[in-house]
Image (cartoon, rainbow, N blue to C red):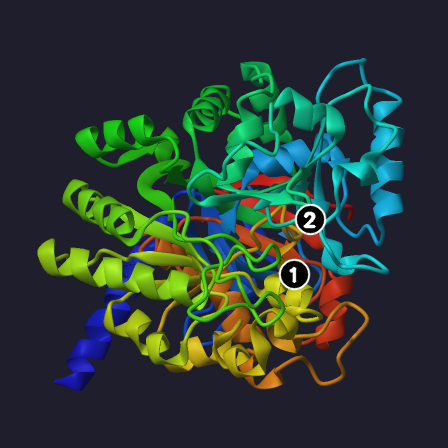
Amino acid sequence: MRLVVIVASLASLIASCSRESSHPADLILFNGVVHTMVDNSTATAVAILGDRIVYVGDNTGTRAFRGKETRAIDLGGKCVLPGLVDAHGHLDNLGRLLEDIDLVGTTSRAEVLQRVRSHQAQAEAGAWIHGRGWDQNDWSGSNEFPTWRDLAGTEANPVYLDRVDGHAVLLNRTALDAAGITRATPDPPGGRIERDASGEPTGVLVDNAETLVLEKIPSATDSDYDRRLARAIAECNRLGLVGVHDAGTDAQVLASLRRLGERGQLTLNVYSLLDSDAPALVRSFFASGPSTEFDGRLVIRSVKVRADGALGSRGAALLAPYDDDPGNTGLLVDDPDSLYAWTRAALQAGFQVATHAIGDRGNRVTLDAYQRALQEVPSADARLRIEHCQVVDLADVPRFASLKVIASMQPTHATSDMPWAAKRVGEARLAGAYAWRTFLDSGAVLAFGSDFPVESVNPLWGIYSAVTRMDHDGQPAGGWRASESLTTEEAVRAFTAGAAYASFDDADAGTIAVGKRADLTVFDRDVFAVAPRELLDTHCAMTIVRGVVVFEGEK
């Protein structure tokens, strides 16, 4: 009986190959190292017809798929992976950063001021100036928050500078006055106005307090959004990304993505996490249901809510006070009942929920809200997500697997935060911090991203951080809390199969196999064979989205 089954299977396979080869492939990649991510199998060649993979195997097998119009590319040993997907990024913010002041990596207040003044020299008088990326933890001298006084001399323009995590902003005196913020201005719910010893605002607004100034900034035009998003998408393609889960899509970004799609400029698979801060938009989709547009390049079936703030600005909600700020336990941006209500409404409408939760209290109240909602609206395949999961009480880790909650994490957060994380939460709480191995071993599904532009959009940096838990100088030797490190295969899987699962796309993407969508990332060397340090010197050679080469590096 077993022989009959094998013969029948072979006959079916031969017939299938015959049918496929009657239509020459559009694109063939050969002489490569193809990591299919299916049972750790490898191949040397892939053939693509339309937006589908029609062959995976050795070079010889591609002959049956060659035609007069077939483009055949000799990879010369380059590495082919399932298309990498960033499971948590911010496309519009990336586009803005590519245009505005980049403060990432600044090492002092003086350097921030110098970059602002340099940009200001080219700006119109009175126009708002925007920048992003400062992190006081990276500055020499005091690591206290900056103040408007650190931007003295920039008063000809209102200046608005996002902290690297997007959970605090620094205003100069002009912007502070334009927002009408004084010592009498109360802290809004879920937000904090930083004040000096006399009670005067310092110019730093944390979390929901940012809304006090945002309403004063002139709105971007449609062309501003289109230009920024097009630049962000091109940057993602250049670095090997075939898809992004856009964490917090509002009405303006969605409209821009649709305009790009109509013009054929959507060269990225975008899975939108609708922003709960745009409740009218979200409720309109709850009423009409999930949406798949532009042949699946734009999918809308998830909503992003927020439990707390960020660790760097001491806004992450903790179960016990911060070690370096004993009177502070952080901020719950949304109260537990609101988290539950959003989750219940989303489940009833057939939508996924992705909740920003960084602190151990933020994660616990989110899990509690999910558990309560799932009991009332049972779902066989809800795939609820928690975004970041940076500091989690060890008692709560098993709940991710038991509730089937996806841990959407960003490896480079660990290597950025490791110089000061222990100061914030103490050594004991680090047991559940940036704990990828602990989560994976517990049975949770990992989906990796970068949180760009908080961190670099380059996925290789995330893989490097996950594997080494070291900075780009190789420090600390052996890795920070190295027991939580992953293998290269595990890290790549979180950027491919894990990200696909987190967006309900696993039937079509995440591995390289016949019938799957032709989303591929090609690197100039085999990322599975090189020493981890070489990942930082590896470059994207080609990005293929739905069978179309959207980026091709130098040959």
Residue 460 image label: 1
Residue 267, visible in the rendered structure: no
Residue pictured at 32% horizontal, 61% vertical: 365
Rounded to the nearest whole Å, what is the CA distance between mark 2 and mark 1? 44 Å
The answer to which quarter of the image holds residue 75 is: bottom right
Residue 176 image label: none
Disc 2, SS: loop
Q: Relative to 462, is 266 on the left or the right?
A: left
* Residue 371: image location, x then y, percent: 21, 63
Question: Which marked residue is nearer to the observer: mark 2 or mark 1?
Answer: 2
Q: Which kind of residue does numbered mark 1 sit on?
A: Leu
Image quarter hosting the N terminus: bottom left
Q: Mark 2 — residue? A: 197
Q: Is residue 39 above or below residue 64?
A: below
The answer to which quarter of the image holds residue 473 is: bottom right
* Residue 416: image location, x then y, percent: 68, 63
Q: Which kind of residue does numbered mark 2 sit on?
A: Ala
The foreground one among 531 and 452 is 452
Q: Relative to 411, is 512 on the left or the right?
A: left
The foreground one among 489 and 164 is 164
* Residue 142: image location, x then y, percent: 81, 59
The foreground one among 424 and 118 is 424
Count neighbours of disc 1 (C-alpha within 10 A) and say few if under 14, some if 14 to 19, many if 20 or more.
many
